Amino acid sequence: MSKSSSLNREQLENLALQGMCFADDNVGEPFGIKDVSERLGISYSYFYHNFVAVMGEPFWHYVKRHRLELAAGLLRHSGYNISEIAEMCGYATIAALSKAFKQHFSVSPMQFKKIAVLPNEKRTLDITETITHVTGNTPLSNFFTYDRCEKIVLPETILYYSLISRGSDPIGAMVARMTHFVSIFQKTRTLYDLQDSRIITGTLDSIPVTDYEKLSMYAGLAIPASALKAHTQLNTTFPGFLYKRIPGGAYLKLPVPMDFATAGLPMYEFITRCCMEGIFKMSGNHFFISLSTTNYCEIYIPLLRKHY
């Protein structure tokens, strides 16, 4: 009997999510479906069909879409040139990225950079405003100013995470279910005495580009990569956790006296405004919120080194 024939629905879904996690964690590297299926210990055919059944799109379609959406996010918020972005997103040449980009978005990368407000961006922000009841004019936005930021250097970390939402209403599910996931990771951190870890939340996607319904929101435990004993313990005890690498380097740290749901909308508007005005540029799409207490959190924004 094959491994796949003995798996239940939850295990099969986890295999698909692990495939998605692998694609996200290796977005700039060359790999094929066979590499992923062998890593998961199932056949090429079974992984292919299971991924479609769980995720609603073929694996390689997801990989291509995810790479192009991340490239679009880097065009919007980073200081990299098109050649650097192509390499970071798994394209060997500028021509290869430009051709795929235009086929997907119907405009060239340079034309895309000139679009002031993207359709998906406006829709996602409007939905988020409705769910969180926060608007850009709220006094809370006064906390999102560059002079309140601290420039720091973070080590490379490994994020052990669970996807909070994957479906029709990702932000709504995130708000509704976050307490449950935070409780899980608080218990994990206490059990293994992980004092240097952070409970964080964010998205695998590029917010201004990805369709709202396809956003993958996560909660997880970020642990310095150097904490080898902790990683051994977690991999042994909780092999079902998804994981990804979060690059070390320069970050902006912005403390805000509010919960993560309230912070999300003004955070994004702050990042977009600062990047467009050239106050800073991001080194990647991996900004996140660190959850400290119920009414206090910290925003971490990866910073291009020359802006540090």
Image: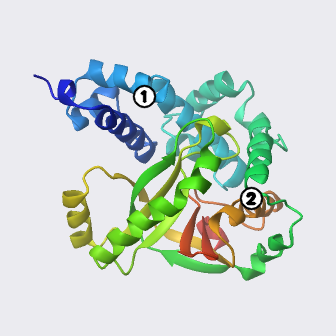
The circle on residue 54 is 1
The circle on residue 265 is 2
Q: Nearer the viewer, residue 173 or 52?
A: 173
* Residue 199 falls left or right of residue 32: right
* Residue 284 falls left or right of residue 30: right
Residue at point 72% right, 48% down?
76
* Residue that lies at the very extreme toward the left in this rendered image: 1
The circle on residue 299 is none
Q: Quadrant of residue 46?
A: top left
Give how far apart the Cα atoms at labels 1 and 2 are: 30 Å
Q: Nearer the viewer, residue 112 or 238?
A: 238
Q: Please, what secondary structure does the residue beneath circle 2 have?
A: helix
How many residues crowd mark 1 within 10 Å: few (<14), some (14–19), many (20+)? some
Display colour scheme: rainbow
Residue at point 60% right, 26% down?
100
Q: Quadrant of residue 51?
A: top left
Asked whether the viewer can see residue 241, the reply is yes
Q: Position of residue 118 (x, y in %)?
A: 79, 39
Image height of 143 relative to 24, above or below? below
Q: Amino acid at mark 1?
A: Val
Residue at point 51% right, 35% down?
91
- Quarter holding the C terminus? bottom right
Asked whether the viewer can see residue 285, the reply is no
Q: Position of residue 98 (x, y in %)?
A: 64, 30
Residue at point 62% right, 79% down?
151
Q: Amino acid at mark 2?
A: Leu
Q: Nearer the viewer, residue 136 or 33?
A: 136
Q: Are marks 1 and 2 in contact (CB under 8 Å)?
A: no
Q: Position of residue 181 (x, y in %)?
A: 45, 60
Q: Nearer the viewer, residue 304 or 285?
A: 285
Q: Give the tally of numbered discs.
A: 2
How many residues crowd mark 2 within 10 Å: few (<14), some (14–19), many (20+)? many
